[in-house]
Amino acid sequence: MASPNVSGQAYAFMAMTPVMPGEEQPLAEYLRGLRARGPSPLARLARTHLARFVIVPDFKNDPTWKQRHEEHLDLNYLIFTSNLDGDLDSYLDELCEKLAPEAKEIWGRCVGCPESAEGAALKTYLRHNQIDTGIFFAAYGEATVATVRKALREREKMIAFAIRAQGMAPAALHEAFLAEFIGAQ
Amino acid sequence: MASVQIDLGDIQGDILRAYGNDYDNTTYAFVKIECPPEQARAWFHGVVDHVTTAETWPPGEKPLTTLNVAVTAPGLRALGVSEDVVGSFSREFRAGMSSRSELLGDVGPSDPNSWEPGLGTGDAHVLLTINAKQAADHQRALGKMKEAMDAVGGLRIVYQEDTELLPGAREHFGYSDGFAQPAIEGASDDKARGGGVPLKDGKWRALAAGEFILGYPDEDTRVDPKKRLPNAPAAPLGRSGTYMVWRKLYQDIALWRRVMRDAAKLYEGGDEHLLSAKVVGRWTNGAPLVKYPDEEPRGYDPKTAEDVNDFRYDGDVDGMRCPLGAHIRRSNPRDALAAVAGPKGVIGFDGHLSFRHRMIRRGMPYGRVLPEGVTEDDGVDRGLVFVSFQGSISRQFEGVQVQWLNAGNIFGLGHDKDFLLGDPHGTGKMTIQGKPPFFLAPQEVFVRTRGGEYLFVPGMTALAALADGTAG
Amino acid sequence: MSIQTPAPAPITATGTQPRNHDGQAIAITVFSTIKLWGRVFLPVLFFVTRRIPKLTGTLRQLSFIHFARWTVIGKLPYNGPPQKKGRFRYPHMYFESNFNGGWEEYIDAFSHILTDGMTAFWGSSYGFPKPLPTAPFKRYIQDNETEADHYYCAYPEATSTMIQRSLELDKKLVALKRDARRMDPDAFAAAYRRFLTDAQNAL
């Protein structure tokens, strides 16, 4: 049976890890400050389509109280989800290597995270805290990030060409197209 | 469902039903209150006594002039309305149009910093709209307005726009305009075809009054078993009122003519008339392209022709008749959103993606016409005073401006902006669908925002409460 | 003329908090508490939905979602103290979506078009009002939504629809490129016209 985490070649990863008491605020500030410090570190993981970090402080209980018992989270939890290309194992390897500087600040503030917060130890930790998806919907699950990027670039190029080429005679059109899309050979 | 009874006597005029083209002259005067609230209310009292309501006139008894009133958020405060009550108005209304400039695309030459003085600064408090049949009546009404202000003192007109209908009731680009008005339950049910919500099997239904008039069920709550009403300001202001958007839009007619002339050289043997119609979605006489794709029908009278507004896009999913990015298709897409042609016909969502984004439009052109054939600018300020009425500025006016006109994504058009109203900062082109398609480029700025305000048009009871200082 | 640098894209990601968007992409993160019958019903619903792709056809046609997921969580992996061990009293549903357009338009579309689907997915959650009218439904989503602390999209200027159209275009363009060199100018001009006609709504 196909994994519920997979749609096409896309993979839905989710890890939900408990935040150490007292570290909630520093973790939130760190994550919220990432944008101000430059491009998202997640951009280093070239197989990531979309990803997020969300700290969930508690469950919301039903205000109409049809729910018999209140239920609360014991701690704040950090959710990391990623919509990624291909196989999870090699993705996590990449993550544990390329996100090492940030991982210590992020998962290093979570209960049970190994001291070093990198490499195989971090990978084992994330795997341990992985939660399987129920339904994964991917609009373009067959396309990798690289494929999408290339297609978007080609579209921009094609639009510009189509405007420029309007009204060209066949010979000029042919020549311009070869120059633009095939390159001189 | 029982039809809703609308209390016309409590609603200001020209909202649910247009006063009509009998009124050649319209003045918009923005008044700043520089006196204490009690003094301002004394003046306001006198104004309110002359306000025209939505009640229908007996045949042949249209008044020579009409008067209507709207207020901005600073205006409510200047009239002495409490912060609590002001806080019950919508966020975007309180923030004001100029604070939403980036969202609305009012950037570059449309930036609020370069707007007409008195607009977008918090100085415009009360908008008086005066309609008159003839110039003489118009002057008399303006004189009375100023007299009343001078009698009280501490009131100043910070911006005034005098407008006049153009010959043939066209707008400056040369198009007959303003037919696609929403049909409203209890007010204009007879206009449901084309004006209402497109349903399955070719049927239509008028829109719930609450989409436009507060205090009535809207399209969301009309079938609510709990009979909840849409969000509205605190009573009595929340009943019979509506939010109003006022924008002065300059139109660069000479530039428009040059761009169309030059672009048409590569289009259908130089058919400039057709190319312009493709951009707009209508021929100059108002005939919609989706009905008349090949040539402008002769003798077409938009005032009597039913198909001027009674049409859908289900027979034109690919935009071969009316381009997917045509102005009228973007600003009122009817059943077009996300519709696809399937083997067994069109699979679409009827009006489900568009029916919460309708507006009543009551614009007026301003400035002299640029004579036909002139392609160099003559320096005259001309364009359109855009006016819309809606229950929610963010959902209706801003939704259309942001998601439909400034961005093309929802139509599958990527970053293409509306070619008529947009700027080159999207893709910078418009696709005219065809075999092969034509790419209209480069995009220029034909329309610039010269100022605007978000206002609230109170109902008659609410106006009286504002004048009495009992609005809370 | 050519497009050198992509122009600043129009703002379409409206109606949500600032950390919930990256360019055109909006993140929505929602937890809900599931009634006990949902523990049985939801896995069945998920199973069926996975096997019948047609059920997600409407989502595909609406085309404003990049990726979305629904996950039922009955217990969390244990990492040692101070974390408490054991199952939750109620199962909880995690929902995330990555989409384009305004938050409000997104929920409206869900309510009006996927009314039955919304009821199927959230009907077993406590406090869930019906999808219609939308105002209470929006309030419910807002109450249960958590703002992202950091959100990333690999192509913030593009939308899901643009990506899908670009991928279609690319396939057609590959064919034209493959054949272009061995064609004579007239044959190419004809092929190019056919290509434009065929691919115009991806441009």
Image (spheres, grey):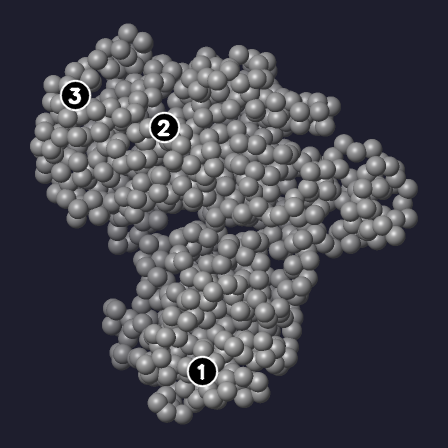
Q: Which residue is pictured at 38% across the width and 15% down the height?
A: B164
| Crowdedness near tag 1: few (<14), some (14–19) or many (≥20) residues, C-alpha within 10 Å | many
Chain identity of mark 2 = B
- In percent of width and height, residue C44 lies at 50, 76
Give the labeled residue for mark 1.
Answer: A108
Mark 3 or mark 2, which is nearer the start of the sequence? 2
Q: Which residue is pictured at 68% across the width and 42% down the height?
A: C2
Q: CA distance from mark 2 to mark 1?
A: 56 Å
Q: Does mark 3 fall on the same chain as mark 2?
A: yes
Image mark for residue B149: 3
State which mark lies toward you, 2 or 3. Answer: 2
| Crowdedness near tag 2: few (<14), some (14–19) or many (≥20) residues, C-alpha within 10 Å | some
Let me know if residue C140 appears in the view. Answer: yes
Amino acid at circle 1: Gly
Tell me the quarter of the picture where residue B206 sits.
Answer: top left
**Quadrant where the image shows the N terminus of chain A:** bottom right
Image check: B188 left or right of A105? left
Tell me the quarter of the picture where residue A8 sits.
Answer: bottom right
Give the labeled residue for mark 2.
Answer: B116
Residue located farthest toward the top when viewing the structure as drawn: B136
- In percent of width and height, residue C33 lies at 36, 74
Tell me: residue B136, above or below residue C151: above
